[in-house]
Amino acid sequence: KAGVTQTPRYLIKTRGQQVTLSCSPISGHRSVSWYQQTPGQGLQFLFEYFSETQRNKGNFPGRFSGRQFSNSRSEMNVSTLELGDSALYLCASSLDNLGVNEQYFGPGTRLTVT
Amino acid sequence: GNSVTQMEGPVTLSEEAFLTINCTYTATGYPSLFWYVQYPGEGLQLLLKATKADDKGSNKGFEATYRKETTSFHLEKGSVQVSDSAVYFCALSLNTGNQFYFGTGTSLTVIP
């Protein structure tokens, strides 16, 4: 089974621009979560999508948004980029069966804002 | 609220040394507990998990026991190898959706 894939792997943008990151979950996984990883803040939860609906949301400004498509693929968008948005953005998918749901992570998209 | 606290790194050990990485948690419900590992340039990989008190998760020589009385889930390995060098994350999940709470990560370097 193919793992979680994220595109692009690396991205360089300028302050004020916007960016869209893509995540394809493991086949059959319906839940997709997004995390921001930085050296100073560690892993911070952005949001989770399930069946095309945002189910959970972290404490990030409205510039960060996402969506999920009917095939469970997800995109996340950051508008009006700031230098502090430079980070590794990780996507994780899970089956969402009852009980414990392990998350399977993609390799991440490294975003650099200049 | 829900949170995970793990020991500060970095940790440097010699090959074949004993490893302990401490992890404690605070949860509003009854969580499942996880250890993830991140190798350089890669995403996180699930290392082991435990879903109820006194459960022991184990994988690749690593072990952790879910201790409800001390709200802890310490990671141990009896003999580390150079290939174990990575960043280790402790995490909890409440069985209401898929929101995970991660610790800040502990960097481990194993020297030959």
Image: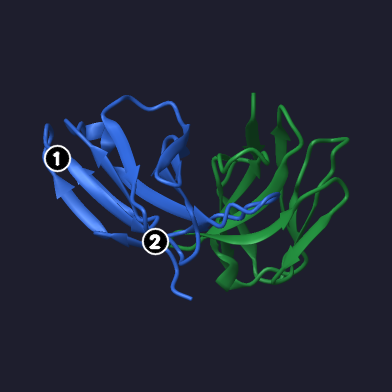
Q: Is residue B45 left or right of residue A23?
A: right
Subunit under mark 1: A
Disc 2 target residue: A107
- Residue drawn at x 84%, y 43% as measured from the top left: B67
Q: Image quarter for residue A47?
A: top left
Q: CA distance from mark 1 to mark 2?
A: 22 Å
Percent of width and height locating residue B14: 65, 66
Q: Tag 2, which chain?
A: A
Kind of residue at disc 2: Pro
Dots 1, 2 in contact, CB < 8 A: no
Name the amino acid type tagged 1: Thr
In the drawing, does residue A17 fall left or right of residue A110?
left
B2 relative to A104, above or below: above
Where residue B95 appears, as percent x and y from the top left, is 68, 41
| Residue that badge 1 annotates | A114
Check chain identity for marks 1 and 2: say if they share one. yes
Label the green chain with its letter. B
The colour assigned to chain A within the rendered structure: blue
In the depicted view, which residue is nearer to us: B104 or A11?
A: A11
Residue A11 is left or right of residue A47, and the answer is left
Q: Position of residue A77 (x, y in %)?
A: 25, 40
**Other residues around mark 1 within 10 Å, as few (<14) / some (14–19) / many (≥20):** some
**Scheme of colours in the image:** by chain
**For marks 1 and 2 on the same chain, the one whose residue lies earlier in the sequence:** 2
User: Helix or strand or loop: what does disc 2 sit on?
Assistant: loop
The residue lying furthest to the bottom in this view is A1
Count all numbered tags in the image, as a single digit: 2
Q: What residue is drawn where x is 76% and y is 46%?
A: B73
Q: Is residue B79 above or below residue A52?
A: below
In x, y percent, where is residue A88? Answer: 34, 48
Q: Going by the image, does A49 lie left or right of B95?
A: left
What's the residue at 40%, 55% (across, down)? A72
